Amino acid sequence: MSKKQQVLARSVPLDAPAHRLLRVPKDFRLGAVDPRSAPGYSGNKLSAAADLKETGRVLDELQERLFAASRSGATPKVLLILQAMDTAGKGGIVRHVVGMVDPQGVEHHAFKAPTEEERAHDFLWRIEKELPGAGHIGVFDRSHYEDVLIHKVRGYADEAELERRYAAINEFEARLVAADTKVIKVMMHISKDEQRSRLAERLERPDKYWKFNPGDIDERLLWDDYMNAYEVAINRTNTEAAPWHVIPANRKWYARLAVASLLREALEEIDPQWPPAAFDVAEQLARLQNS
Amino acid sequence: MSKKQQVLARSVPLDAPAHRLLRVPKDFRLGAVDPRSAPGYSGNKLSAAADLKETGRVLDELQERLFAASRSGATPKVLLILQAMDTAGKGGIVRHVVGMVDPQGVEHHAFKAPTEEERAHDFLWRIEKELPGAGHIGVFDRSHYEDVLIHKVRGYADEAELERRYAAINEFEARLVAADTKVIKVMMHISKDEQRSRLAERLERPDKYWKFNPGDIDERLLWDDYMNAYEVAINRTNTEAAPWHVIPANRKWYARLAVASLLREALEEIDPQWPPAAFDVAEQLARLQNS
């Protein structure tokens, strides 16, 4: 067994696959998830850091294989969709989980409030443009789900339009899956109290001011409406092809380990292989020696 | 002094700023650079790994400041342009240097042979589309320089056209600099022997086959022509606004430390600051407590 195979063979830190532990059931109720919990993990903050590092080593190898395979025409790719209330830790996932693999194989996009041009198109128009290419891991910090979350809460879309969008999302994501995209949908779930203390930190540290916006509190005042909008959207779009995962996120170290595990499992399911040589190795070695 | 300021204040690993050590002089001759050398560094592979890690910590903080400042309207951004012969280590720079900062703040693009659509446009058309936004570090793995390197070597462009392109590049890059882009141009320089042994490794390891293309040897057979094309292109586009750096790259650990140092120095020159609060902190804290 090579050193790299040994890395791959090492045991996983969770009791069961993260995609089973965290996958949303039928008729899901968000209130059933305790944001302080750590499903399937009996370790602590310290062990989680070590487990994350180890998972990162596996991810790094799998991502390179995925990328390599695409150079020989393999089409698989991964799309990680991150949704959450402010401060729930999307940015930390990007930095500490996605940051463990080669930037060459990552396509990250943070969706902001749509521009005038984007608003003039269907809500999926701007999403399509940011889809990851073959061999890549795409990461969406927010996504098309904003169009059924804030739009529901704020009443920017009526019920009929929201229903149309849920259906459109399901069709869109089914198309992605059919085109060899492994879609990992993640809602990071923090408690309202935890958000207060994280927002307070942003207001107490001058190096964090830039992360704060008074609008964050406006949204916070609508917390229950958001929880309801998430619950409805998750239930409406929790398809077999592209299921939802809700990650308890009060403990950042658990959320990071959980998302890293979801990525790892997705890549292991793809099981990308080093492509065979598309040339005669001996012949090329001989050419090289003479060059 | 805060912990973060202490990190920033730590001494740099090179004898002198990398941008001075490695900057290309007037009437530059590529033959004057020894690919095995390590200008300004008296350490070894082991110390270089530690120095790289330390530089990474500084980079990470500077990059976050750059990103934060852009959220308040600051326009600076960085563009790292990597050019080199095959196997010289561009990919390693992306993985081991760029990989040290938050993926959220990085825009990486690898330029391949142009598509039909791209060829139907001016050679800078596809480049413009990949320029980094404010607060970001853009990384070009190959670039518009291919249009004066392979095009010169292969005769895809005649001398008059090449001269037109050098001038167009200088105007283009001056425009980037005027728009608050710190342009870092890097040629990673390996010896022909070193390339042979690196190509041989790709032919000896099945997990490296995917990095090899028989065309790499075709290009290698034109080594001297490429060295000449680089030398001419570098001299023609070595402007005050966007100077060239040639990095001895036979020792990967030196090349990585050198490029990390160039990035660090560029960011230190920008000196991005945490933006001040654009809101009344006490007022927002009070709102938060009541929410």
Image (spheres, coloured by chain):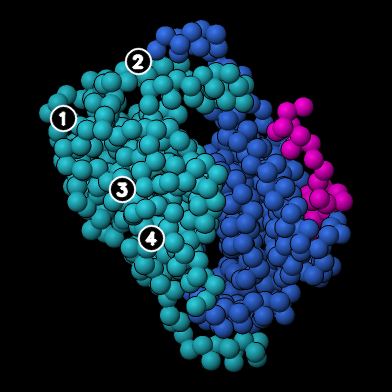
Chain colours: A cyan, B blue
Marks 3/1: CA distance? 33 Å
Q: Residues within 10 Å of mark 2 (few under 14, many from 20)?
A: some
The residue type indicated by label 1 comes to: Glu
| Position of residue A147 in the picture relative to residue B23 (left or right) | left
Q: Which residue is mark 4?
A: A267
Q: Return the chain for callout 4.
A: A
**Residue visible at 50% across and 50% down?**
A52
Q: Residue A21 — which label? A: 3
Asked if B13 appears above or below B225 in the picture, the reply is above
Marks 1/2: CA distance? 24 Å
Marks 4/1: CA distance? 35 Å
- Magenta run includes residue B6: yes
Q: Which residues are magenta?
A: B1-29
Asked if A280 appears above or below A188 in the picture, the reply is below
Marks 4/2: CA distance? 39 Å
Q: Secondary structure at mark 2?
A: loop
In the rendered image, residue A224, in percent from the top left (x then y), is placed at 28, 20
Q: Of residues A61 and A48, which is closer to you in this image? A: A48
| Position of residue B42 in the picture relative to residue B66 (left or right) | right
Q: Secondary structure at mark 1?
A: helix
Q: Residues within 10 Å of mark 3 (few under 14, many from 20)?
A: some
**Residue visible at 75% across and 37% down?**
B8
The residue type indicated by label 3 comes to: Leu
In the rendered image, residue B225, in percent from the top left (x then y), is placed at 68, 75
Q: Residue A161 — which label? A: 1
Q: Return the chain for callout 1.
A: A
| Position of residue B236 in the picture relative to residue A50 (left or right) | right
Q: Which residue is mark 2?
A: A221
Q: Are marks 2 and 3 on the same chain?
A: yes
